Amino acid sequence: MAASQHVSLTVNGRSVQAVVEPRLLLVHFLRESLGLTGTHVGCDTTHCGACTVLLDGKAIKSCTQLAVQADGREVLTVEGLAKDGELHPIQEAFLARHGLQCGFCTPGMLMTTYALLNANRKPTEEQIRAAISGNLCRCTGYVKVVDSVRQAARTLARPARAKPRTGRRRTTGRRR
Ligand code: FES
Ligand code: FES
């Protein structure tokens, strides 16, 4: 077995140091070592997108990255979206527009949406559908997901959001 390696990274704004096996997948590091179980595992084959997180701002499937590949980098998971107990506008939009049913795909959908809207605040439906094409949902039929992303885009595009967070304390990225 290869020697364990020390990794130092930032996860949801917090500095994390750990010693990991080189073969440890990032998703297992997040879920099992850090207890961040909002990131789901749906397939383990880079297919479903349930494990999507941001690595240095880019949406990646954490089931196909090694934890050691995140060394020195910044990871954002679904747990990092809400601040001070208040949902992120993207989470609010998914709630308001019913962009989830069972919620299993939702953390990945939220993180993909976050990356999309960081790059493009006014995506077309085609661009939204292209962005979420790597995130599978077996419940919603995607129409409500697209609607949720559009709602989030509208909220985030407002120049001076008088009320950027509503104070709701529910979490859409459920723990499993
Ligand atoms: Fe990573 Fe499905 S668990 S893509
Ligand atoms: Fe159930 Fe998407 S809400 S898989």
Image (cartoon, rainbow, N blue to C red):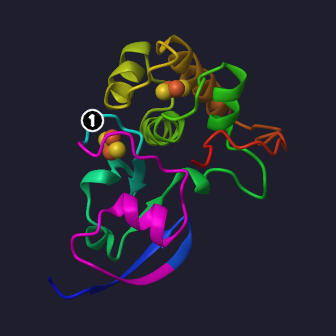
Q: Where is residue 119 in the image (x, y as percent from the top left)?
A: 42, 39
In front here: 77 or 155? Answer: 77
Q: In this view, does 117 lie above or below 25?
A: above
> Label 1 amino acid?
His
- Locate the N terminus by quadrant: bottom left
In front here: 130 or 20? Answer: 20
Q: As drawn, which residue projects farthest toward the left?
A: 1
Residue 91: image quadrant is top right
Is residue 118 found left or right of 24 in the rendered image? right
Is residue 140 found left or right of 112 in the rendered image? right
Which quadrant of the figure shows ligand 1?
top left
Is residue 92 found left or right of 75 in the rendered image? right
Is residue 11 found left or right of 152 in the rendered image? left
- Residue occupying the point 60% across, 23% down: 101
Is the distance from the Cβ of mark 1 to the nearest ligand 1 atom less than 8 Å? yes
Q: Position of residue 44 (x, y in %)?
A: 28, 46
The residue carrying mark 1 is 47
- Binning the other alpha carbons within 10 Å of mark 1 as few (below 14), some (14 to 19) or many (20 upward) gives some
In front here: 62 or 32? Answer: 32
Mark 1 secondary-structure assignment: loop
96 magenta-colored = no
Looking at the rendering, the stretch of residues picked out in magenta corresponds to 16-45
Q: Where is residue 80 in the image (x, y as percent from the top left)?
A: 59, 57
44 magenta-colored = yes
